[in-house]
Image: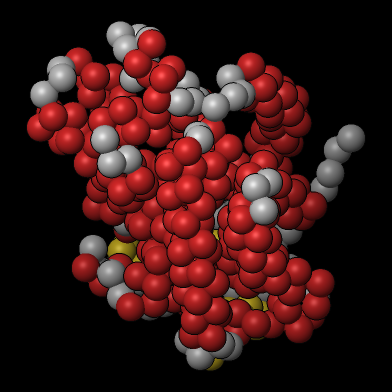
Amino acid sequence: MIFDYETMKVIWWALIGILLIGFAVTDGFDMGVGLLLPFLGRTDAERRVIINSIGATWEGNQTWLITAAGATFAAWPLVYAVSFSGMYLAMLLVLFALFFRPVGFDYRNKLADPRWRSAWDWGLFTGGAVPALVFGVAFGNLLLGVPYHFDDTMRSFYTGSFWLLLNPFALLAGVVSVAMLVMHGSVYLQIRTTGVINARAMRATFVAATLLIVAFALAGWTVTRINGYQITQMPAIGLTPLPLAKTVIAAPGAWLANYRLYPWMMLAPAGVFTGAVLAVLLSRLGWPKLAFIASGAAVAAVILTAGCSMFPFIVPSSSHPGSSLTAWDAVSSHLTLQIMFWVVLIFVPLIILYTGWVYRVLRGKITVEMIEADNKTMY
């Protein structure tokens, strides 16, 4: 089975989206649990229950982020170059925040000093909160456009700054990201915990889902008023991607064009509201596993909404729209995309099957009694 170059470009746009969704749905609830740790755990034993609910699986979940970054580098090298150079400080902030996770899990229980353990609890909170916020801010800036351009030799020049990334709309997108991951994490805690932690997680699900619905609706309203981007001329350029060969305009409401052309795409934003509402209802009815599926669907729908709105744009340029990178011209060679396609087709299903097996083996509730009975080996 060999696809032509244009088809492979669309396939890889979809595959990168799937990898991002895999990261958000799996490692997302880990980050949500870390965000909730200092607030849902009132005693050291309760906080250890929360930590051990994800302690055995968080490392495997985080590999989705590494996989998505590696796939972006191989499939969209120009996107990787522009994003990681233009948003370098933001990426470093995420990296430094993620450092707290492995050391927090491994060192927290080494000393019984409450101050020591409290410090690592806030470290785990930071490892969940900062990436969740920064990733949302990054998506918000992609929708606004990033100030960069290419010269005649295809060297990229970023003309913005770290502080310009923290604009109101991007921060609103960050709130959407944090709210959806807190919702997802709190539903997961309902699956793995009992008693007061379970009850607190249920209340957190309601608060986070409500915030997600409000923030997402406000972000959607804002998108109708900010500049989106549209390709007005895309000359036939054969098999050689040339980012500077196209003509792009910025216009208010341009991000809605795909929904007018393909009304079925409205299922994505509708899925955010539906998933969030179902997550609350199902958690209140005592069906946390179904609520987890609903919250995961809402998380996936948020990412799908961004992708459907922007397609085929990947990194629009606000300062030089013609330099914008799209799924048509930011890609690697046809051969590279084909080889990677087969690698993904073989190994990603194996990873999913193995992950499912791990969660099946490690299923069950974590209780304070379990922590006290196995005090030395549990986190």
Residue at position x 73%, y 79% in the image: 259
Residue 142 left/right relative to 233: left
Report x, y in % for residue 36. Answer: 36, 47
The furthest residue to the right = 1
**Mark count:** 0
- Above or below residue 244? Residue 13 is above
Let me know if residue 71 appears in the view: no
Let me know if residue 168 appears in the view: yes
Report x, y in % for residue 73. Answer: 50, 41
Residue at position x 30%, y 68% in the image: 165
Residue 328 left/right relative to 201: right
Report x, y in % for residue 361. Answer: 64, 16
For the residue pair 344 and 225, the one nearer the viewer reads as 225
Residue at position x 67%, y 41% in the image: 289
Report x, y in % for residue 43. Answer: 26, 35
Quadrant location of the N terminus in the rendered image = top right
Residue 302 left/right relative to 348: left
Residue 175 left/right relative to 93: right
- Above or below residue 328? Residue 26 is above
Residue at position x 80%, y 75% in the image: 262
